[in-house]
Image (cartoon, helix red, strand yellow):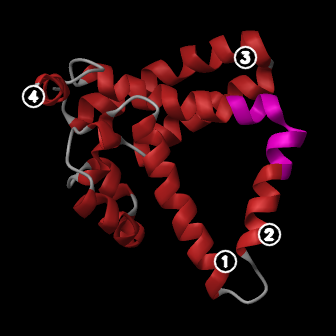
């Protein structure tokens, strides 16, 4: 299992090749977005947000946003370190907080937030795909550095 410093170094090194690959397929704007989202995903949306990690410290005073995630998600479980599922859970936590914020601020509404997201997906599908590829790419980099995309704990639970 890699240290937090090793995870950070790898994200900085591997986000550019990921962005170049996406750029060759979807265009350079999408490639740049993929690179930036990989960096953001690796540095701020790490699977290790369920522990006292570098990623959690980077949130500073907003670290409290991850309190439910830290207390409900077991470390290195399918829900935190699982391919696709782990990042989906972390994005779900952020979306939930955004929805709560829109309910607390009168000029905003949850419907407005969801409509805006839907419009962005329709108007910029390649960029939206690039964003998701970058985020998920950062999660895969983390998972692979931890030793295997299918940690031994999952295999033990499956056999039972």
Real-space Cα distance between discs 4 and 3? 44 Å
100 lies above or below 9: below
Viewer-side label of 1, 3: 1
Residue at the bottom extreme, as displayed = 106
Q: Which residue is mark 4?
A: 160
Q: Which residue is mark 1?
A: 102
Judged left or right of residue 54, residue 87 is right
Q: Main secondary structure of the magenta part?
A: helix
Viewer-side label of 3, 2: 2
> On residue 112, which mark appears?
2
Real-space Cα distance between discs 3 and 2? 31 Å
Real-space Cα distance between discs 2 and 1? 9 Å
Identify the mark nearer the N-term, 4 or 1. Answer: 1
Q: Position of residue 109 (x, y in %)?
A: 74, 78
Q: Quadrant of the N terminus?
A: top left
Q: Which residues fall within the magenta stretch?
A: 119-129
Real-space Cα distance between discs 4 and 2? 45 Å
| Front residue of 12 and 127 | 127
Query: Do callouts 4 and 3 mark residues in contact (Cβ within 8 Å)?
Result: no
Q: Which residue is mark 3?
A: 23
60 lies above or below 73: below
Query: Do callouts 2 and 1 mark residues in contact (Cβ within 8 Å)?
Result: yes
């Amino acid at each position: 299992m890699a240290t937090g410093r090793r995870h950070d170094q790898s994200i900085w090194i591997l986000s550019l090749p990921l962005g170049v690959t996406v750029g060759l397929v979807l265009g350079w704007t999408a490639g740049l977005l993929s690179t930036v989202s990989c960096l953001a995903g690796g540095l701020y949306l790490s699977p290790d947000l369920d522990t006292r990690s570098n990623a959690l410290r980077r949130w500073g005073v907003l670290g409290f946003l991850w309190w439910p995630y830290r207390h409900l998600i077991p470390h290195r479980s399918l829900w935190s370190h699982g391919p696709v599922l782990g990042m989906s859970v972390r994005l779900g936590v952020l979306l939930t907080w955004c929805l709560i914020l829109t309910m607390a601020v009168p000029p905003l509404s949850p419907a407005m937030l969801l409509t805006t997201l839907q419009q962005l997906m329709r108007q910029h599908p390649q960029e939206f795909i690039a964003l998701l590829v970058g985020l998920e790419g950062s999660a895969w980099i983390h998972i692979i550095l931890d030793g295997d995309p299918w940690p031994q704990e999952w295999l033990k639970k499956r056999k039972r």
